Amino acid sequence: MSFFKTLFSKPLSLTLSVTSANGFHLRPVAQFCTLAKSFPCSLTASLDDKTVDAKAVNALLSLSLEQGDSFRLSAKGNKADKALEALEACFTALMQNDKEMHSTEKTSHPYLGETIEAAIIFRGVSLAPVHHHTLQERQNKSELTFKEAVDKSMEELESLCLKHKDRENGAIYLAQKELLFSLGSTSATLSEFERKIQMESQKLIGTILDSKRSDYQDILQRTKSHLGFNTEVIFPDVPFILVSEHLLPSDVDTLILTKVAGVILQETALNSHTAILLRAAGICAVICDAVLTQNETIILDANAGVILQNPSQEDVEKALQRQTTEHVQQQLSANNRFQKAYTAGGKPIQVLANVSDLASAQSAKEQGAEGIGLLRSEFLFKSEKPSFLTQKEAYEAIFALFDEITVRTLDVGGDKALPYIALPHEANPFLGVRGIRLLLTHPAILEEQLHALFVAAKNKPIKIMFPMVSSVEEFVNMKRFTQEIAKKYALDISHLRFGIMIEVPSVLFLLEAFNEVVDFYSIGTNDLTQYLFAIERTHPLLKTDELSPVVYAAIEMIMQKASKPVSICGELAANKYALPTLLKLGITTLSVSPSSIAQTKEEIRHA
Ligand code: PEP
Ligand code: MG
């Protein structure tokens, strides 16, 4: 479209209806605005006589769109038609995928005393004194300007998004980032930003988005912390039940480290971000606006969804009994975590861990892992390139923990960019230089890593695995490269094993040839699913179904054709719904995250 045509063209518009029972709330709005911002045309949303910028999260939220509301989306200028088409599809998918949060069903309870009803966020029973959440603000010195503090907060939220990208937390951080972009980046000073936060969050009071007000406070607090304002929250050093009006999503990370026995949120909803994170952290929690006194001991029964004040000795004993029963069930899987897992039919299944550094490897050991099935070595390379010595020492420390260890060489490219590796600019990075293909562009980095791995392995039969392999030639060239390195540094690597991740569908059709050259395979279902469906795994809108028969058919094909050991290290390995099929297909080694080990072993025992 020419400049004049664009300037004088009429706006195009369409009507969108909110179908989700949650309304058009922060997370979907953030995803919608991220897409809207990628178009050059102007975009507005109108409800009744109010029209707002459809690229700004806070503006769109201010329409308070609830289920049944219809709003008009208008586009004017360059690519207006394309924008409307894409945003309509995005909106439809967001509405369909926005799961309604049902309150957890309450169990019956045996208490004789008077009970106060509460909505359950996460199950559990606790008995402890009440502690009211109070904040104290202290100002320390800061070198940063307001703008720098906003930028730093944006960076933090960006990296939190990446870190949690496959989980619900990722969407929460994305939503907060968008919110900060539209309110913080458009403010000149902290007080202007505070004013905007105050005004925007006030507009949500009493609307369906009321529970999202804590996200506004959270971005304000994050930015203020970079300006030296630190809010200090002091938690008791003994078990306590936290009662809070304003627990922020980011406070949950701190809370996990305390002796918290339970949480009572006074003003929020089951699908508030704070509630989602409490659930993810496994903290017994409810929503209830009862007036509770500091230090009074209460029973919080989040299985029955009740609170008891001044409990009688009899009720205390009943609560303790219910707590014990619950702990016994949890402990059962935890207690058995060091025991080998056999299926109900008596078949032994090896449960290994996916780790990224020494801390996660130690946690895997503590959780009962039998070894490491996937060391994602790229995490060692995060912000700056580690030296040979740093790498060698890190590998040595991890290798000392287990006998069975598989290390994956640096897997960058696609969704895993590294700031100091200048990859060629590519239109489709997910189909470009990544994983093993780094040998073509950055052989020196791989040489240093392999050298460090060989030295750290000493005489241990470490398995070395290459990511994103798509042809036999790639593997053969890499194997030749390893032999040249071993020769150059006069190292014997005959005890090491070399294998590949199966993540690219072409490998399925080359297995006979691969059988001749590799020592083992590990199926990376995360990327394999992405490439089978041609849907980017980080795509905000399109979602693949990892339980699809297509994925099982691929695994079946691998199991039939592979003559070398096969394990599975994608997220599917920890999916309890997939487990029976994986075992039926002949999988005998699963590699899962440390926190899933005890549970996975327990499920194997019942499979
Ligand atoms: C996979 O692709 O399944 C896998 C385990 O690797 P990552 O998730 O690190 O890409
Ligand atoms: Mg992968």
Image: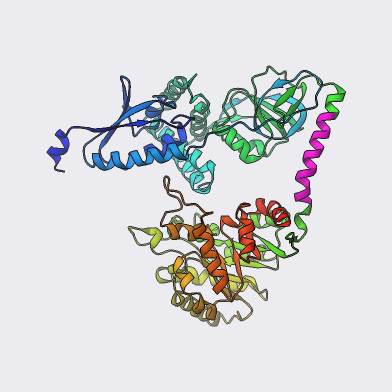
Residue 549 image offset from top left, x and y in percent: 51, 58
Q: Is residue 407 left or right of residue 260?
A: left
**x, y percentage for residue 125?**
75, 33
Q: Which residues are magenta?
A: 318-335
- In the image, is 225 to the left or to the right of 48? right
Q: Can residue 144 be spotted in the picture?
A: no
- Using the image as rendered, state which of residue 357 and residue 468 is in the foreground: 468
Q: Is residue 319 magenta?
A: yes
Where, quadrant-wise, is the N terminus in this rendering?
top left
Residue 345: image quadrant is bottom right
Q: Quadrant of the C terminus?
A: bottom right
Considering only vertical position in the picture, is 467 above or below 275? below
Q: Nearer the viewer, residue 296 or 33?
A: 33
Q: Is residue 334 above or below residue 255?
A: below
The percent coordinates of residue 460 (x first, y second) are: 67, 73
Look at the magenta stretch and give its main secondary structure: helix
**Magenta-span inclusion, residue 213:** no
